[in-house]
Image (tube, grey):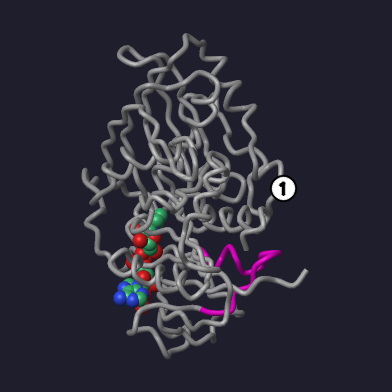
Amino acid sequence: MEKIPVAILGATGSVGQKFIQLLINHPWFEIKELAASETSAGKKYKDVVEWFVSDEIPEQVANLEVKKCEPNLDCKVAFSGLDSSIAGEVETAFAKKGYKVISNSRNHRMDDDVPLLIPEINPDHIELVKKQKYGGGLIVTNPNCSTIGMTLALKPLIDDFGISDINVVTMQAVSGAGNPKKVGLNIDDNVIPWIKGEEEKMEIEPLKIFGTLNNQRIDFNKMNISAQCNRVNVTDGHLEAVQIRLKKKVDKEDIINSWNNFSSEPQKLDLPTAPKKPIHYFDEDDFPQPKIHRNIENGMAAATGRLRPDKFFDFKFVVLSHNTVRGAAGGAILCAELLKAKGYI
Ligand code: NAP
């Protein structure tokens, strides 16, 4: 099969670098173009990137010229890891020129005609792109990184038992804030109890993700969510403490079975980036931990644990997921694979 040429918009950033790492040997997609801000454009990638996701910049991209984020790139698909100050308008411009845009940025997530897609949860929402007016182009978005981990853990429980209320407290990794060398977080010996816009995203995005597709629109889910988000001194991997109120009386074993038995469309289609098992439950008292479990199934699976009854809700547990893989670049690549498998790319 001839590989599909792709561009990475925001290729120098934290998510952009992860896209490169995950796409370099991808069986369906081939990196053809890298683009970033005007400061980086016109120079070789290796001369402008502060590479920090692995030891060396892959040689296939090191000498590529970084382009401006203008819709004249030699590719079909544009993966976007752009800063949200610019992402919205750039992604629209690319879609209007016929590119298939898969975005990690918040700008288009809540648009009526844009799927907020997690392939294991709401693959049917892809249909929304039929409402888009971009000719051959389209925009599909990936949810916020902490939303992805939490909703993966909730999906089988919502299907099997129903959930009415959720309280979540996050402990989010430093890489979620962008390139750690550039953002200058005061994180050594510290916790920062605020992440701009994060709590609002965690409280609204799941309602769209778990919404029902109805005549090419989404009827939002009605559950209640309260979120508190914190930045902690961990390189990668968001850990989240979740309390849930269920619509049915169940035992701990029912929840564990629900997680263990969960499998969905990406697994059925055997998509290249899909984890074999989307949720891994751990029974040990002190698991899961970012340092030990963030790379489970190449960073594409969520790890759950510490499941126990709760005094105020029904149950509480923790969930861990890799923020730049499952929560960003890997999740977006899985969306693109689903789009390809369903004939949209
Ligand atoms: P980042 O490290 O700050 O990277 C931002 C990228 O955007 C860089 O490549 C930068 O290029 C480019 N850029 C900035 N201003 C631009 C402009 N005016 N024109 C063109 N390109 C411009 O940020 P990040 O952490 O990778 O996040 C990227 C996006 O993904 C954000 O919207 C973020 O909210 C979202 N996201 C991030 C994560 C995560 O875990 N990090 C997870 C989910 C979603 P230069 O280097 O040339 O400035």
Residue occupying the point 45% across, 72% down: 96
Q: Is residue 215 magenta?
A: no
Q: Nearer the viewer, residue 243 or 119?
A: 119
Q: Quadrant of residue 67?
A: bottom left
Indicate the position of residue 280 as horizontal and vertical percent values: 58, 34
Magenta residues, as a range? 18-33
Callout 1: helix, strand or loop? loop
Res. 263 image quadrant: top right
Image mark count: 1
Q: Residue at x 47, y 87 (%)?
A: 44
Q: Does residue 11 appear in the picture of this structure?
A: no
Read off the residue under disc 1: 270
Instruction: State which quarter of the image contains the C terminus.
Output: bottom right
In this view, the residue farthest toward the right is 1
Q: Residue at x 45, y 55 (%)?
A: 141
Q: Residue at x 31, y 34 (%)?
A: 169
